Image (cartoon, grey):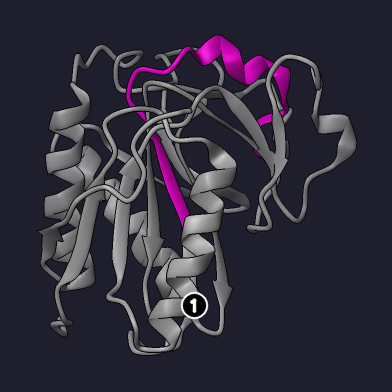
Amino acid sequence: MQNFPAVEWAVSDAPVPYEAAVALMEARARAIREGEASELVWFLEHPPLYTSGTSAKPEDLKDAARFPVFEAGRGGQYTYHGPGQRVAYVMLDVAARGRDVRAFVQNLEAWIIAALAAFDVDAGPRDGRVGVWVDRTQAGSPLREDKIAAIGVRLKRWVSFHGISLNVEPDLEHFSGITPCGIADPRYGVTSLVDLGIPASMGDVDIALRDAFEAVFGSQLVVVPSPLQTVP
């Protein structure tokens, strides 16, 4: 595996407003492309909200009044963010990392899968369904698979932003206000580590994600102060 330069890693300890996070990501992506800033991976949580990707269908927003709704500009459809969910925004120079968007997304999947393996969770991608899934099918019962992590990225001048979200201990009922990622089939739901019976803390998950990132992306993560901390 090729080794790449170290990447800055910031963790915000309190919920970060969505619009402020997007503004920071866009500014950082520009600075990376201009050679004025290092790559950054940013771990955070958001207050409860829904976001719509470029493929979102209006009918998939089932309760528009429940939480604020934001147009994300990333790929994908509707998703939920909220407390108990680890969001990882990745601002990486994809041009310097091979200029291969498909391989980049596959690396994001591999990152999540490797982090979940640290908790003995067998997860993986599914054809035709974005994100990372776990099989919840009981012996003798119909197929049941639940999504534990979402992926939605955008590239501007070959620098990525947005990223992944991994369900640690969010309120899963909050997903009911949308059709998550446009998937209405009752065989497919949403889960979290705690829902799977794994009482992992956010700190435990951060360590697993850090180690998996370094293994998959070939860059050491170097801790830096959080760019944003709290909701005003």
For disc 1, the marked residue is: 30
The quarter holding residue 165 reads top left
Instruction: Kindly identify the amino acid type of the residue bearing the numbered disc 1.
Output: Arg
- Is 232 placed left or right of 219 in the picture? right
Image quarter (top left, top right, bottom left or bottom right) of the N terminus: bottom left
Q: Name the residue located 71 percent from the left edge and 27 percent from the top edge.
A: 185
Q: Name the residue located 21 percent from the left edge and 17 percent from the top edge.
A: 198
Residue extending furthest front?
232
User: Between 107 and 66, which is closer to the camera in this rendering?
Assistant: 66
Q: Which residues are magenta?
A: 162-181
Residue 124 shows in the view = yes
User: Between 144 and 209, which is closer to the camera in this rendering?
Assistant: 209
The quarter holding residue 173 reads top right
- Is 21 placed left or right of 204 in the picture? right
Vertically, is 61 above or below 113? above
Magenta stretch holds residue 103: no
Vertically, is 230 above or below 129? above
Residue 94 shows in the view = no
Please tell me whether mark 1 sits on a helix, a strand or a loop: helix
User: Between 145 and 83, which is closer to the camera in this rendering?
Assistant: 83
Question: In the rendering, at what x and y percent does residue 137 appear?
Answer: 44, 20
User: Between 197 and 57, which is closer to the camera in this rendering?
Assistant: 57
Q: Name the residue located 30 percent from the left edge and 15 percent from the top edge.
A: 194
Q: Name the residue located 56 percent from the left edge and 18 percent from the top edge.
A: 142
The quarter holding residue 201 reads top left
